[in-house]
Image (cartoon, rainbow, N blue to C red):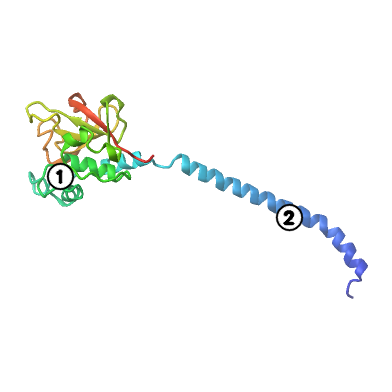
């Protein structure tokens, strides 16, 4: 038999507290889920790779890149770095490599392969500001002057890693080859003694 209005009212009065408890439990579970999601998002933000770190990682991923053919100042990647920096095929490319590192950290492209210009602040308007070598952070440019290379204030540029380590384009893998025209991308730990300048690279974070 169908419920009478009085029976329906009595049933609803009995069920109402149960439904309220169920709704409260559901709200509590939703709040807990939202809190966990927010915690995960905060964790991602904390561990997010900065633009500076991203640039350094990209630079390290290029280690082992060498000229093809040897001594040509060219190769698939190398020619691309030179071209992006406004250079011509076969030009020396240490600065073009350093410029590419900055670009992969979100910075504006420098159209220049001449290390002296960059070290002296020709691109300060773009944020590439000369600083003291001791102030350099990972990802910043370090400029070197090697004995007997040229009469220029600097002959070579690399990217600071940590301590005395740098990653450089157009250098040799060890002390035996040319340090400023060695034909490859390598990590060096013995060039900071020749550092004569540095430039802060304008990474966004």
Q: Nearer the viewer, residue 134 or 39?
A: 134
- Residue furthest toward the bottom? 1
- Would you place residue 32 above or below residue 19 in this image? above
Residue 173: x and y in percent read: 16, 36
Quadrant into which the C terminus falls: top left
At horizontal 15% and vertical 50% (from top left) the residue drawn is: 79
- Would you place residue 21 above or below residue 112 in this image? below
SS of the residue under disc 1: loop
Q: Nearer the viewer, residue 187 or 199?
A: 199
As drawn, the label of residue 23 is 2
User: Which residue is under mark 1?
Assistant: 66
At horizontal 15% and vertical 44% (from top left) the residue drawn is: 66
Q: Quadrant of residue 195?
A: top left
Residue 165: x and y in percent read: 25, 30
- Would you place residue 62 above or below residue 165 in this image? below
Residue 159: x and y in percent read: 25, 35
Q: How many marks?
A: 2
SS of the residue under disc 2: helix
Residue 9: x and y in percent read: 89, 64
Which comes before the other along the chain, label 1 or label 2? Answer: 2
Quadrant into which the N terminus falls: bottom right
Please indicate, yes or no, whether residue 159 appears anywhere in the rendered image: yes
């Amino acid at each position: 038999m169908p419920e009478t209005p009085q029976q329906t009212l009595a049933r609803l009065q009995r069920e109402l507290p149960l439904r309220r408890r169920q709704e409260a439990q559901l709200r509590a579970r939703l709040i807990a889920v939202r809190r966990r999601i927010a915690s995960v998002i905060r964790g991602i933000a904390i561990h997010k790779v900065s633009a500076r770190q991203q640039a350094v990682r990209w630079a390290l991923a290029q280690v082992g890149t060498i000229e093809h053919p040897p001594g040509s100042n060219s190769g698939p990647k190398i020619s691309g770095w030179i071209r992006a920096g406004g250079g011509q095929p076969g030009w020396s490319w240490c600065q073009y490599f350093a410029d590419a590192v900055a670009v992969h950290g979100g910075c504006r492209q420098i159209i220049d392969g001449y290390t002296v210009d960059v070290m002296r602040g020709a691109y300060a308007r773009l944020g590439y500001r000369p600083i003291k070598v001791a102030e350099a952070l990972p990802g910043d440019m370090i400029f070197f002057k090697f004995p007997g290379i040229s009469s220029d204030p600097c002959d070579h540029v690399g990217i600071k890693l940590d301590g005395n380590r740098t990653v450089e384009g157009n250098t040799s893998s060890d002390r035996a080859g040319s340090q400023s025209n060695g034909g490859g991308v390598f990590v060096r730990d013995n060039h900071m003694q020749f550092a004569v300048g540095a430039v802060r690279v304008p990474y966004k974070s």
